[in-house]
Image (spheres, rainbow, N blue to C red):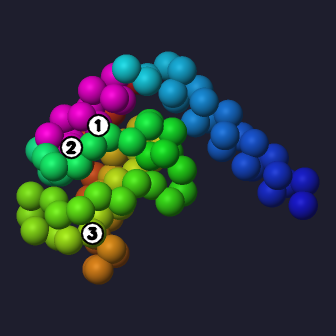
Amino acid sequence: MKAKRQKTDTSRSGRKLVLSKYRTYLKEKLSSVYKNYFPFEELSPLDHYLNEEGVYAEQDHLGNPRIIVQIKMNPLRIEVQELASHTRRVVWQMIGG
């Protein structure tokens, strides 16, 4: 039990560190992704994209009806997942750091 709790805490602290260090940069990158892929959707708060569930978006530019948008760490990246086929794509990834 303790090991599982520690892993969750580390994950939370990792998300907090990412947000404190890259909040403005990530918001800019996420805005760009939304402009290109989901022009009719509004951004959610950044911490929602870091959760396991991600954020649902409708209809990307390729015609996929339901998408989950997530910010993943190690390496820091923005992924989209098509719900119907479970296909994942990295739409942005940080190089360096």
Residue 63 pos. (x, y %): 10, 68
The amino acid on which the numbered mark 1 sits, given as a three-letter code, is: Leu
Q: Quadrant of the C terminus?
A: top left
Front residue of 20/10: it is: 20
* Residue 77 part of the magenta-drawn span: no
Label 1 or label 3, whichever comes before in sequence order: 1
Question: What is the magenta range?
Answer: 25-35
**Alpha-carbon span between mark 2 and mark 3:** 14 Å
| C-alpha span from label 1 to label 3 | 17 Å
Q: Position of residue 88 (x, y in %)?
A: 31, 64
SS state under label 1: helix
Helix, strand or loop under label 3: strand
Asked if residue 93 lies left or right of residue 75, the reply is left
State how far apart marks 2 and 1 are (Cα). Answer: 6 Å
Which residue type does callout 3 highlight? Answer: Arg
N-terminal of the pair, mark 2 or mark 3, is 2
Which residue, as the protein is rendered here, is positioned at the far right?
2
| Residue at 52% across, 29% down | 18
User: Is residue 34 found inside the magenta-colored segment of the image?
Assistant: yes
SS at mark 2 in the image: helix
**Residue at the image point whose x is 75% and y is 42% from the top:** 9
Mark nearest the camera among 1 and 3 is 3
Determine which residue is flagged by label 3.
66
| Mark 1 lies on residue | 30
